[in-house]
Amino acid sequence: MNETKTLASYIVSNRWEDIPADVRHEAKRSIINVFGCAIGGSAHQAVTTAIRALGPFSGERTAGVIGRVERLDPLHASLMNGISSHVEDYDDTTPKNYSHTSSPVSSALFAYASANRVRGRDFVEAFILGFEAASRVGNVVYPAHYDVGWHITGTIGVFGAAAAIGKLIGLNEQQMIWALGLAGTQSAGLREMFGSMGKAFHPGRSAQNGYAAALLAQAGFTSGERGIEGPRGFAHVTAATRDLSKIGTRLGVDFDLRENTYKPFPCGIVNHPTIDGAIQIHDADRPDPASIVAVRLRVAPLVLDLCNQQNITKGLQGKFSVYHGAAVGLVRGKGGLREYTDEAVNDPAIKRVRELTTATGDPSITEDQVKIEVELRDGRRLTKFVEQSLGNIHRPLTDRQLDEKFRDQAVMVLPADAVESLIQLCWNIDELDDVGQLVRTSVPGAAPVERETVS
Protein backbone atom coordinates (compact mmCIF):
# COMPACT_ATOMS: atom_id res chain seq x y z
CA MET A 1 0.00 0.00 0.00
CA ASN A 2 1.02 3.62 -0.52
CA GLU A 3 -0.32 5.32 2.59
CA THR A 4 1.35 8.65 1.80
CA LYS A 5 -0.47 8.82 -1.53
CA THR A 6 -3.74 7.74 0.08
CA LEU A 7 -3.53 10.54 2.63
CA ALA A 8 -2.41 13.11 0.06
CA SER A 9 -5.25 12.21 -2.30
CA TYR A 10 -7.81 12.55 0.46
CA ILE A 11 -6.56 15.96 1.56
CA VAL A 12 -6.46 17.35 -1.98
CA SER A 13 -9.86 16.00 -3.04
CA ASN A 14 -11.83 16.80 0.11
CA ARG A 15 -14.61 19.36 -0.13
CA TRP A 16 -16.21 21.40 2.65
CA GLU A 17 -19.50 19.64 1.96
CA ASP A 18 -17.84 16.27 2.71
CA ILE A 19 -17.25 17.20 6.36
CA PRO A 20 -20.08 16.35 8.79
CA ALA A 21 -21.66 19.21 10.74
CA ASP A 22 -20.62 17.81 14.13
CA VAL A 23 -16.98 17.69 13.01
CA ARG A 24 -17.16 21.30 11.85
CA HIS A 25 -18.50 22.29 15.26
CA GLU A 26 -15.77 20.33 17.04
CA ALA A 27 -13.23 22.15 14.91
CA LYS A 28 -14.58 25.45 16.20
CA ARG A 29 -14.32 24.15 19.77
CA SER A 30 -10.70 23.20 19.10
CA ILE A 31 -9.94 26.56 17.52
CA ILE A 32 -11.45 28.64 20.35
CA ASN A 33 -9.56 26.49 22.85
CA VAL A 34 -6.16 26.72 21.18
CA PHE A 35 -6.53 30.40 20.26
CA GLY A 36 -7.27 31.21 23.90
CA CYS A 37 -4.21 29.22 24.92
CA ALA A 38 -2.07 31.13 22.43
CA ILE A 39 -3.25 34.48 23.81
CA GLY A 40 -2.74 33.31 27.38
CA GLY A 41 0.76 32.07 26.61
CA SER A 42 1.77 35.00 24.40
CA ALA A 43 3.38 36.98 27.22
CA HIS A 44 5.31 33.98 28.56
CA GLN A 45 9.05 34.39 28.89
CA ALA A 46 9.55 31.56 26.40
CA VAL A 47 7.85 33.54 23.64
CA THR A 48 9.66 36.77 24.50
CA THR A 49 12.98 34.94 24.55
CA ALA A 50 12.33 33.22 21.22
CA ILE A 51 11.39 36.49 19.52
CA ARG A 52 14.45 38.21 20.94
CA ALA A 53 16.72 35.40 19.77
CA LEU A 54 15.24 34.72 16.33
CA GLY A 55 13.40 37.89 15.41
CA PRO A 56 16.53 39.48 13.90
CA PHE A 57 16.60 36.66 11.35
CA SER A 58 13.03 37.18 10.17
CA GLY A 59 12.31 37.83 6.53
CA GLU A 60 9.73 40.35 5.37
CA ARG A 61 7.47 41.02 8.37
CA THR A 62 4.11 40.34 6.77
CA ALA A 63 2.60 38.12 9.49
CA GLY A 64 1.17 38.84 12.92
CA VAL A 65 1.94 36.82 16.03
CA ILE A 66 -1.04 35.93 18.22
CA GLY A 67 -1.20 38.25 21.24
CA ARG A 68 2.01 40.13 20.35
CA VAL A 69 2.74 43.53 18.81
CA GLU A 70 5.74 42.19 16.89
CA ARG A 71 5.40 41.17 13.27
CA LEU A 72 7.56 38.51 11.60
CA ASP A 73 7.68 36.52 8.40
CA PRO A 74 5.00 33.78 8.31
CA LEU A 75 7.43 30.95 9.09
CA HIS A 76 8.76 32.64 12.22
CA ALA A 77 5.22 33.68 13.19
CA SER A 78 4.21 30.01 12.99
CA LEU A 79 7.02 29.13 15.38
CA MET A 80 6.01 31.78 17.92
CA ASN A 81 2.32 30.85 17.72
CA GLY A 82 3.23 27.24 18.40
CA ILE A 83 5.30 28.12 21.44
CA SER A 84 2.63 30.40 22.92
CA SER A 85 -0.25 27.97 22.34
CA HIS A 86 1.56 25.10 24.09
CA VAL A 87 3.82 26.69 26.69
CA GLU A 88 1.21 26.55 29.47
CA ASP A 89 0.26 22.94 28.58
CA TYR A 90 -3.36 24.05 28.47
CA ASP A 91 -4.13 23.06 24.86
CA ASP A 92 -6.14 20.05 23.73
CA THR A 93 -5.25 16.36 23.81
CA THR A 94 -6.34 13.43 21.66
CA PRO A 95 -6.15 10.56 24.20
CA LYS A 96 -5.83 7.80 21.60
CA ASN A 97 -2.28 8.99 20.84
CA TYR A 98 -1.66 11.73 23.44
CA SER A 99 -0.92 14.38 20.84
CA HIS A 100 -1.75 18.08 21.16
CA THR A 101 -2.55 18.39 17.50
CA SER A 102 -4.38 21.72 17.34
CA SER A 103 -1.28 23.68 18.35
CA PRO A 104 1.01 22.99 15.37
CA VAL A 105 -1.82 22.94 12.84
CA SER A 106 -3.52 26.15 13.96
CA SER A 107 -0.22 27.95 14.56
CA ALA A 108 0.78 27.60 10.93
CA LEU A 109 -2.71 28.45 9.69
CA PHE A 110 -3.03 31.62 11.77
CA ALA A 111 0.39 32.79 10.60
CA TYR A 112 -0.67 32.22 6.99
CA ALA A 113 -4.06 33.90 7.51
CA SER A 114 -2.45 36.96 9.07
CA ALA A 115 -0.36 37.48 5.93
CA ASN A 116 -2.89 36.30 3.32
CA ARG A 117 -6.63 36.85 3.13
CA VAL A 118 -8.32 33.53 3.97
CA ARG A 119 -12.04 32.78 4.12
CA GLY A 120 -13.17 31.22 7.36
CA ARG A 121 -14.69 28.19 5.68
CA ASP A 122 -11.41 27.43 3.92
CA PHE A 123 -9.48 27.91 7.16
CA VAL A 124 -11.70 25.52 9.12
CA GLU A 125 -11.56 22.89 6.37
CA ALA A 126 -7.75 23.09 6.27
CA PHE A 127 -7.64 22.83 10.07
CA ILE A 128 -9.82 19.70 10.07
CA LEU A 129 -7.75 18.03 7.36
CA GLY A 130 -4.46 18.96 9.02
CA PHE A 131 -5.68 17.66 12.35
CA GLU A 132 -6.81 14.40 10.77
CA ALA A 133 -3.57 13.92 8.85
CA ALA A 134 -1.42 14.44 11.94
CA SER A 135 -3.54 12.31 14.23
CA ARG A 136 -3.74 9.40 11.81
CA VAL A 137 0.03 9.39 11.41
CA GLY A 138 0.24 9.40 15.20
CA ASN A 139 -2.16 6.46 15.44
CA VAL A 140 0.13 4.46 13.16
CA VAL A 141 3.13 4.66 15.52
CA TYR A 142 1.53 5.00 18.97
CA PRO A 143 2.42 3.71 21.56
CA ALA A 144 5.84 2.36 20.50
CA HIS A 145 6.93 5.75 19.17
CA TYR A 146 5.95 7.55 22.37
CA ASP A 147 7.31 4.91 24.70
CA VAL A 148 10.91 5.28 23.51
CA GLY A 149 10.87 9.03 24.10
CA TRP A 150 9.54 10.82 21.03
CA HIS A 151 7.24 13.76 21.81
CA ILE A 152 4.42 12.92 19.46
CA THR A 153 3.04 16.47 19.28
CA GLY A 154 6.23 17.63 17.60
CA THR A 155 6.84 14.56 15.47
CA ILE A 156 3.37 14.33 13.92
CA GLY A 157 2.42 17.99 14.12
CA VAL A 158 4.68 18.72 11.16
CA PHE A 159 2.51 16.46 8.97
CA GLY A 160 -0.62 18.32 10.06
CA ALA A 161 0.85 21.75 9.38
CA ALA A 162 2.07 20.66 5.95
CA ALA A 163 -1.32 19.20 5.07
CA ALA A 164 -3.25 22.25 6.30
CA ILE A 165 -1.09 24.85 4.55
CA GLY A 166 -0.88 22.62 1.47
CA LYS A 167 -4.67 22.53 1.31
CA LEU A 168 -4.94 26.31 1.61
CA ILE A 169 -2.41 27.02 -1.12
CA GLY A 170 -3.96 24.46 -3.47
CA LEU A 171 -1.31 21.76 -3.78
CA ASN A 172 -2.10 18.99 -6.24
CA GLU A 173 -1.73 15.33 -5.29
CA GLN A 174 1.91 15.04 -6.32
CA GLN A 175 2.84 18.22 -4.49
CA MET A 176 0.99 17.04 -1.37
CA ILE A 177 2.93 13.76 -1.45
CA TRP A 178 6.14 15.80 -1.54
CA ALA A 179 4.90 18.05 1.27
CA LEU A 180 4.16 15.05 3.50
CA GLY A 181 7.56 13.57 2.69
CA LEU A 182 9.34 16.83 3.45
CA ALA A 183 7.36 17.04 6.68
CA GLY A 184 8.41 13.55 7.71
CA THR A 185 12.07 14.21 7.16
CA GLN A 186 11.83 17.21 9.53
CA SER A 187 9.94 15.32 12.25
CA ALA A 188 11.42 15.87 15.72
CA GLY A 189 10.72 16.31 19.42
CA LEU A 190 12.05 14.55 22.53
CA ARG A 191 10.19 13.90 25.78
CA GLU A 192 13.38 14.76 27.65
CA MET A 193 12.34 18.38 27.11
CA PHE A 194 9.25 18.07 29.35
CA GLY A 195 9.34 20.62 32.14
CA SER A 196 11.31 23.16 30.09
CA MET A 197 10.70 25.69 27.32
CA GLY A 198 11.96 23.04 24.92
CA LYS A 199 8.63 21.22 25.07
CA ALA A 200 6.73 24.20 23.64
CA PHE A 201 9.41 24.54 20.97
CA HIS A 202 8.17 21.26 19.46
CA PRO A 203 4.73 22.38 18.16
CA GLY A 204 6.26 25.72 17.16
CA ARG A 205 8.97 24.15 15.08
CA SER A 206 6.57 21.58 13.59
CA ALA A 207 4.24 24.42 12.55
CA GLN A 208 7.15 26.28 10.98
CA ASN A 209 8.61 23.21 9.27
CA GLY A 210 5.25 21.96 8.00
CA TYR A 211 4.50 25.38 6.53
CA ALA A 212 7.92 25.34 4.84
CA ALA A 213 7.33 21.82 3.50
CA ALA A 214 4.14 22.97 1.77
CA LEU A 215 5.87 25.99 0.21
CA LEU A 216 8.78 23.88 -1.01
CA ALA A 217 6.44 21.31 -2.55
CA GLN A 218 4.47 24.06 -4.28
CA ALA A 219 7.71 25.29 -5.86
CA GLY A 220 8.55 21.80 -7.16
CA PHE A 221 10.99 20.73 -4.45
CA THR A 222 10.66 16.94 -4.40
CA SER A 223 10.76 14.33 -1.66
CA GLY A 224 10.61 10.56 -1.49
CA GLU A 225 7.23 9.26 -2.59
CA ARG A 226 6.64 7.09 0.51
CA GLY A 227 7.62 9.37 3.36
CA ILE A 228 5.26 7.75 5.85
CA GLU A 229 5.30 4.03 5.02
CA GLY A 230 8.58 3.48 3.16
CA PRO A 231 11.10 1.02 4.68
CA ARG A 232 13.17 4.01 5.78
CA GLY A 233 10.21 6.35 6.18
CA PHE A 234 8.72 7.92 9.29
CA ALA A 235 6.76 4.93 10.61
CA HIS A 236 9.52 2.34 10.31
CA VAL A 237 12.32 4.59 11.53
CA THR A 238 10.56 6.01 14.60
CA ALA A 239 8.52 3.04 15.87
CA ALA A 240 9.51 -0.57 16.51
CA THR A 241 5.89 -1.59 15.91
CA ARG A 242 3.35 0.17 13.78
CA ASP A 243 -0.04 -0.23 12.09
CA LEU A 244 -0.10 1.51 8.73
CA SER A 245 -3.72 0.52 8.13
CA LYS A 246 -4.68 3.36 10.49
CA ILE A 247 -3.92 5.89 7.76
CA GLY A 248 -6.63 4.84 5.35
CA THR A 249 -9.21 2.90 7.38
CA ARG A 250 -12.54 4.77 7.15
CA LEU A 251 -10.70 7.90 6.04
CA GLY A 252 -13.28 10.64 5.54
CA VAL A 253 -15.83 8.77 7.66
CA ASP A 254 -14.23 8.63 11.11
CA PHE A 255 -12.64 11.85 12.37
CA ASP A 256 -10.26 12.00 15.32
CA LEU A 257 -11.59 15.48 16.12
CA ARG A 258 -14.64 13.72 17.54
CA GLU A 259 -12.36 12.26 20.20
CA ASN A 260 -10.50 15.45 21.02
CA THR A 261 -10.52 16.69 24.62
CA TYR A 262 -9.90 20.06 26.27
CA LYS A 263 -7.95 20.55 29.45
CA PRO A 264 -9.52 22.03 32.58
CA PHE A 265 -6.03 22.24 34.14
CA PRO A 266 -2.82 23.60 32.52
CA CYS A 267 -0.57 20.57 32.90
CA GLY A 268 0.03 17.03 31.65
CA ILE A 269 -3.38 15.47 31.02
CA VAL A 270 -2.65 12.32 33.02
CA ASN A 271 -2.40 14.55 36.12
CA HIS A 272 -6.00 15.68 35.72
CA PRO A 273 -7.72 12.86 37.65
CA THR A 274 -5.47 13.55 40.65
CA ILE A 275 -6.13 17.30 40.58
CA ASP A 276 -9.86 16.71 40.10
CA GLY A 277 -10.00 14.27 43.05
CA ALA A 278 -7.85 16.45 45.31
CA ILE A 279 -10.09 19.46 44.65
CA GLN A 280 -13.14 17.35 45.50
CA ILE A 281 -11.55 16.36 48.83
CA HIS A 282 -10.66 19.99 49.50
CA ASP A 283 -14.19 21.18 48.80
CA ALA A 284 -15.93 18.41 50.75
CA ASP A 285 -13.69 18.12 53.83
CA ARG A 286 -11.61 21.33 53.97
CA PRO A 287 -8.57 19.63 55.53
CA ASP A 288 -6.05 21.99 57.11
CA PRO A 289 -2.89 21.55 55.01
CA ALA A 290 -0.84 21.57 58.22
CA SER A 291 -2.81 18.54 59.47
CA ILE A 292 -1.91 16.37 56.47
CA VAL A 293 0.70 13.72 57.28
CA ALA A 294 0.54 11.63 54.11
CA VAL A 295 -1.06 11.59 50.66
CA ARG A 296 -1.14 8.30 48.79
CA LEU A 297 -2.06 8.03 45.11
CA ARG A 298 -2.82 4.98 43.04
CA VAL A 299 -2.49 5.97 39.41
CA ALA A 300 -2.20 4.49 35.95
CA PRO A 301 1.40 3.43 35.22
CA LEU A 302 1.61 6.02 32.43
CA VAL A 303 1.31 8.77 35.04
CA LEU A 304 4.64 7.76 36.56
CA ASP A 305 6.18 7.59 33.11
CA LEU A 306 5.07 11.10 32.18
CA CYS A 307 4.58 13.06 35.40
CA ASN A 308 6.96 11.73 38.03
CA GLN A 309 8.98 14.93 38.56
CA GLN A 310 9.97 15.52 42.18
CA ASN A 311 12.25 18.02 43.96
CA ILE A 312 10.95 20.71 41.62
CA THR A 313 11.57 24.45 41.75
CA LYS A 314 10.02 25.77 38.50
CA GLY A 315 6.42 26.18 37.42
CA LEU A 316 7.06 24.38 34.14
CA GLN A 317 8.31 21.37 36.13
CA GLY A 318 5.11 21.38 38.17
CA LYS A 319 3.13 20.65 35.04
CA PHE A 320 4.78 17.20 34.96
CA SER A 321 4.54 16.39 38.66
CA VAL A 322 1.52 14.40 39.83
CA TYR A 323 2.70 15.20 43.38
CA HIS A 324 2.35 18.91 42.72
CA GLY A 325 -1.09 18.34 41.18
CA ALA A 326 -2.26 16.60 44.37
CA ALA A 327 -0.77 19.32 46.54
CA VAL A 328 -2.34 22.31 44.78
CA GLY A 329 -5.73 20.60 44.72
CA LEU A 330 -5.61 19.86 48.45
CA VAL A 331 -4.06 23.17 49.55
CA ARG A 332 -5.72 25.66 47.23
CA GLY A 333 -8.74 23.77 45.92
CA LYS A 334 -7.87 24.71 42.35
CA GLY A 335 -5.43 23.91 39.56
CA GLY A 336 -5.34 27.00 37.37
CA LEU A 337 -2.54 28.94 35.72
CA ARG A 338 -1.49 30.50 39.03
CA GLU A 339 -0.94 27.05 40.52
CA TYR A 340 1.79 26.37 37.96
CA THR A 341 3.98 29.40 38.53
CA ASP A 342 7.39 29.44 40.19
CA GLU A 343 5.68 31.07 43.17
CA ALA A 344 3.19 28.23 43.60
CA VAL A 345 5.81 25.52 43.19
CA ASN A 346 7.83 27.13 46.00
CA ASP A 347 4.88 27.97 48.27
CA PRO A 348 5.80 26.40 51.66
CA ALA A 349 2.36 24.83 52.25
CA ILE A 350 2.20 23.35 48.75
CA LYS A 351 5.81 22.19 48.92
CA ARG A 352 5.19 20.45 52.25
CA VAL A 353 2.15 18.51 51.00
CA ARG A 354 3.91 17.68 47.73
CA GLU A 355 6.80 16.13 49.63
CA LEU A 356 4.36 14.06 51.71
CA THR A 357 2.76 12.63 48.56
CA THR A 358 3.60 9.22 47.13
CA ALA A 359 2.27 7.58 43.98
CA THR A 360 2.01 3.92 43.02
CA GLY A 361 1.38 2.70 39.50
CA ASP A 362 -1.58 0.32 39.33
CA PRO A 363 -2.47 -1.43 36.03
CA SER A 364 -6.09 -1.70 37.17
CA ILE A 365 -6.37 2.11 37.21
CA THR A 366 -7.11 3.71 33.83
CA GLU A 367 -5.55 6.95 32.68
CA ASP A 368 -8.79 8.80 33.50
CA GLN A 369 -8.88 7.49 37.09
CA VAL A 370 -7.14 7.85 40.44
CA LYS A 371 -7.50 6.58 44.01
CA ILE A 372 -6.51 9.15 46.63
CA GLU A 373 -6.02 8.64 50.35
CA VAL A 374 -5.20 11.60 52.60
CA GLU A 375 -4.08 10.75 56.12
CA LEU A 376 -4.55 13.45 58.77
CA ARG A 377 -2.75 13.98 62.05
CA ASP A 378 -5.85 13.00 64.07
CA GLY A 379 -5.91 9.59 62.37
CA ARG A 380 -8.72 10.28 59.93
CA ARG A 381 -8.33 9.13 56.32
CA LEU A 382 -10.05 10.99 53.51
CA THR A 383 -10.48 8.96 50.35
CA LYS A 384 -11.65 9.63 46.82
CA PHE A 385 -11.94 7.49 43.72
CA VAL A 386 -12.27 9.44 40.47
CA GLU A 387 -13.72 7.17 37.82
CA GLN A 388 -13.74 9.69 34.96
CA SER A 389 -11.84 12.93 35.29
CA LEU A 390 -13.19 16.32 34.27
CA GLY A 391 -12.38 17.21 30.66
CA ASN A 392 -12.12 13.68 29.31
CA ILE A 393 -14.25 12.35 26.49
CA HIS A 394 -16.95 11.23 28.97
CA ARG A 395 -17.00 14.51 30.96
CA PRO A 396 -16.14 17.06 28.27
CA LEU A 397 -15.99 20.79 28.79
CA THR A 398 -19.11 22.44 27.40
CA ASP A 399 -19.03 25.26 24.86
CA ARG A 400 -19.69 27.74 27.67
CA GLN A 401 -16.91 26.28 29.79
CA LEU A 402 -14.58 26.76 26.83
CA ASP A 403 -15.70 30.40 26.70
CA GLU A 404 -14.80 30.79 30.39
CA LYS A 405 -11.45 29.10 29.88
CA PHE A 406 -10.76 31.50 27.01
CA ARG A 407 -11.68 34.51 29.17
CA ASP A 408 -9.53 33.38 32.10
CA GLN A 409 -6.46 33.35 29.88
CA ALA A 410 -7.15 36.22 27.51
CA VAL A 411 -8.00 38.83 30.18
CA MET A 412 -4.39 38.61 31.36
CA VAL A 413 -3.38 40.13 28.01
CA LEU A 414 -6.39 41.98 26.57
CA PRO A 415 -9.24 44.22 27.77
CA ALA A 416 -12.59 42.55 28.35
CA ASP A 417 -14.28 44.02 25.25
CA ALA A 418 -11.55 42.65 22.98
CA VAL A 419 -11.87 39.24 24.66
CA GLU A 420 -15.62 39.13 24.05
CA SER A 421 -15.10 40.19 20.43
CA LEU A 422 -12.61 37.35 19.93
CA ILE A 423 -14.94 34.77 21.44
CA GLN A 424 -17.64 35.74 18.98
CA LEU A 425 -15.20 35.75 16.06
CA CYS A 426 -14.03 32.25 16.97
CA TRP A 427 -17.51 30.79 17.14
CA ASN A 428 -18.35 32.37 13.79
CA ILE A 429 -15.01 31.67 12.13
CA ASP A 430 -16.55 29.66 9.30
CA GLU A 431 -18.58 32.73 8.28
CA LEU A 432 -15.66 35.17 8.21
CA ASP A 433 -14.36 36.68 5.01
CA ASP A 434 -10.93 37.32 6.56
CA VAL A 435 -9.61 35.13 9.41
CA GLY A 436 -6.76 37.60 9.87
CA GLN A 437 -9.26 39.61 11.96
CA LEU A 438 -8.67 37.17 14.78
CA VAL A 439 -4.92 37.70 14.88
CA ARG A 440 -5.25 41.48 14.55
CA THR A 441 -7.81 41.69 17.36
CA SER A 442 -5.56 39.61 19.64
CA VAL A 443 -2.81 42.25 19.60
CA PRO A 444 -2.75 44.39 22.77
CA GLY A 445 -3.97 47.88 21.94
CA ALA A 446 -5.98 46.81 18.90
CA ALA A 447 -9.60 47.94 18.74
CA PRO A 448 -12.27 45.21 18.82
CA VAL A 449 -13.80 44.68 15.39
CA GLU A 450 -17.14 43.55 14.07
CA ARG A 451 -16.93 40.32 12.14
CA GLU A 452 -16.86 40.53 8.36
CA THR A 453 -18.99 37.72 7.03
CA VAL A 454 -18.83 36.04 3.67
CA SER A 455 -21.23 37.78 1.29
Image (spheres, helix red, strand yellow):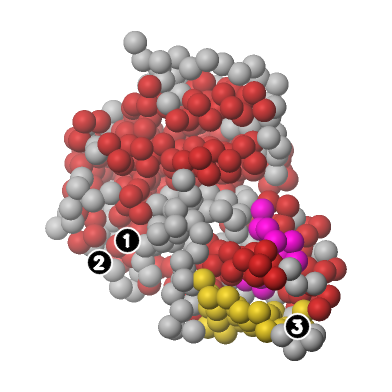
Q: Residues within 10 Å of mark 2 (few under 14, many from 20)?
A: some
**As drawn, is 133 to the left or to the right of 326?**
left
Which of the marked residues, 2 or 1, is nearer the chain's N terminus? 1
Cα gap from disc 3 to disc 1, whole angstroms = 44 Å
Residue kind at label 2, given as amino acid type: Asp
Q: Residue at x 40, y 59 (%)?
A: 394
Residues under numbered marks 2 and 1 in contact, where contact means CB atoms less than 8 Å apart: yes
User: Split into 4 quadrants, where in the image is the C terminus?
Assistant: top left
- Residue 322 part of the magenta segment: yes
| 331, above or below 427, in the image | below
Q: Residue at x 83, y 64 (%)?
A: 347
For the stretch drawn in magenta, the main secondary structure is: helix
Which of the marked residues, 2 or 3, is nearer the chain's N terminus? 2
| Callout 2: SS | loop
Can you give x and y, in whole percent of width and height, for residue 289 in the image?
A: 79, 72
Q: Quadrant of residue 444?
A: top right
- Residue at the spot of label 1: 139
Residue kind at label 3, given as amino acid type: Leu
- Residue at the spot of label 2: 243
Mark seen at residue 370: none
Residue kind at label 1, given as amino acid type: Asn
Cα gap from disc 2 to disc 3, whole angstroms = 49 Å
Cα gap from disc 2 to disc 1, whole angstroms = 8 Å
Can you give x and y, in whole percent of width and height, for residue 356 in the image?
A: 74, 81
- Residue at the spot of label 3: 376
- Residue 391 part of the magenta segment: no
Residue 313 appears in the rendering: no
What residue range appears in magenta?
321-336
Q: Residue at x 78, y 60 (%)?
A: 344
Total tally of numbered discs in the picture: 3
| Callout 3: SS | strand
